[in-house]
């Protein structure tokens, strides 16, 4: 991804893509103390627009607050830069990655002279798990790695270091021939995927793990909102792995993964083993919203070009 044309924003400047570099002694590279976001822009009725920019920006600032990091820009500036990253790189649809990280001004955990650097990049990124996954669903394995304990790492923060746990789990799942991992919390209840929130459907109702040990997913919130507006009851509660085995339907949600059906967990077929009707309905509505084909949540879309 580093060797291409385009521009990346770093600390107030637009740099040629290949020149947006950091020093090897970058503090966050060593210890993982940074915060980031992942957003998508879609091409739709009104041109290209970022989906739920405000909520992602709010979460970035909440993540920084949790980590005790001061972002040297305000929300409006970073929002504007993210829009600019999409149109400067001439993207119709895009994945957008802002990140705040500590620089190479000091080494050692005690370094107190660290500067907070901010970067924003945007590039084209198709379906995270492949377009076939969106239709056919994926095969998931319960991870042998426990989700970050709530008092070891801060799960409300989308912090770089949190993803070591995700990488271990995903690598294990892929090595075992599965598409994604399901991580359990330290008490053994289903938490989330390596980068997705979990939902199950049973008896026409939608269930999702409460937010105790999972990221406050923005796609999760979108799905809960859409479902409730359809009159589907949504319940946040602790979910066991065997509740997933016997669910009528299950799916993962995430900005990258969008709404991906889960067709199998640990070798047990879920429901019909195909994308279920509730999943399909929510998925199709989700794609309508992100592409601006529905107009009842105008606040969810920010056009990347000002009027
Ligand atoms: N959980 C984790 C651990 C994630 O990394 C992500 C992706 N940001 C999600 C859930 C889904 O969050 P969102 O819908 O806001 O992308």
Image (cartoon, rainbow, N blue to C red):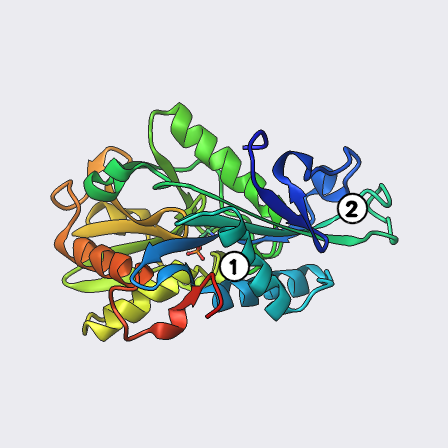
Q: How many marks?
A: 2
Q: Nearer the viewer, mark 2 or mark 1?
A: 1
- Give the vertical position of 121 relative to 175 (above or below): below
- Give the vertical position of 173 relative to 204 (above or below): above
Crowding near the residue tagged with mark 2, few <14, some 14–19, many ≥20 C-alpha atoms within 10 Å = many
Q: Along the line of sight, which residue is nearer the eye, 208 or 216?
A: 216
Instruction: Report whether 74 appears left or right of 162.
Output: right
- x%, y% of residue 108? 84, 42
Does residue 234 appear in this view? no
Q: Along the line of sight, which residue is nearer the eye, 246 or 162?
A: 162
- x%, y% of residue 168? 51, 34
Q: Along the line of sight, which residue is nearer the eye, 34 or 43?
A: 43
- Residue that badge 2 annotates: 103
* In contact (CB < 8 Å): disc 2 and disc 1: no
Q: Along the line of sight, which residue is nearer the eye, 29 or 262?
A: 29
Q: Quadrant of residue 210?
A: bottom left
- x%, y% of residue 211? 45, 63
Instruction: Report whether 156 appears left or right of 173.
Output: right
Q: CA distance from mark 2 to mark 1?
A: 25 Å
Q: Say which element carries label 2.
A: loop
Q: Quadrant of residue 294?
A: bottom left
Q: Say which element carries label 1.
A: helix
- x%, y% of residue 139? 28, 35
Instruction: Report whether 157 appears left or right of 129.
Output: right
Q: Residue at x 27, y 56 (%)?
A: 287
Q: Which image quarter holds the N terminus? A: top right
- Residue that badge 1 annotates: 83
> Could you say which disc has been placed on residue 302 in the image?
none
Q: Earlier in the sequence, mark 2 or mark 1?
A: 1
Crowding near the residue tagged with mark 1, few <14, some 14–19, many ≥20 C-alpha atoms within 10 Å = many
Does residue 140 appear in this view? yes
């Amino acid at each position: 991804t580093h060797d291409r044309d385009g521009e990346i924003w770093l600390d107030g400047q637009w740099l040629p893509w290949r020149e947006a570099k950091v020093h090897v002694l970058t503090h966050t590279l060593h210890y993982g103390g940074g915060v980031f976001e992942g957003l998508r822009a879609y091409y739709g009725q009104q041109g290209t627009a970022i989906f739920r920019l405000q909520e992602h920006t709010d979460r970035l600032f909440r993540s920084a607050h949790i980590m005790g990091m001061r972002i040297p820009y305000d929300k409006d500036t970073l929002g504007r830069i993210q829009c600019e990253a999409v149109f400067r790189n001439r993207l119709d649809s895009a994945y957008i990655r802002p990140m705040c990280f500590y620089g190479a001004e000091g080494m050692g955990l005690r370094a107190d002279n660290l500067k907070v650097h901010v970067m924003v990049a945007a590039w084209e990124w198709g379906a995270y798990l492949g377009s076939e996954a969106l239709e056919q669903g994926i095969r998931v394995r319960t991870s042998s790695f426990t989700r970050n304990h709530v008092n070891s790492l801060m799960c409300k923060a989308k912090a770089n270091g949190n993803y070591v746990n995700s990488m271990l789990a995903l690598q294990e799942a892929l090595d075992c021939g599965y598409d994604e991992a399901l991580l359990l919390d330290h008490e053994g209840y289903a938490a989330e995927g390596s980068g997705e929130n979990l939902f199950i459907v049973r008896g026409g109702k939608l269930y999702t793990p409460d937010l105790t040990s999972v990221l406050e997913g923005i796609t999760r919130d979108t799905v809960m909102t859409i479902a409730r507006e359809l009159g589907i009851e949504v319940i946040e509660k602790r979910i066991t792995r065997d509740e997933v085995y016997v669910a009528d339907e299950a799916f993962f949600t995430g900005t990258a993964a969008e709404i991906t059906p889960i067709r199998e967990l640990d070798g047990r077929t879920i429901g019909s083993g195909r994308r279920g009707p509730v999943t399909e309905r929510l998925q199709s509505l989700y794609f309508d919203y992100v592409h601006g084909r529905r107009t009842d949540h105008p606040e969810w879309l920010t056009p990347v070009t000002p009027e």
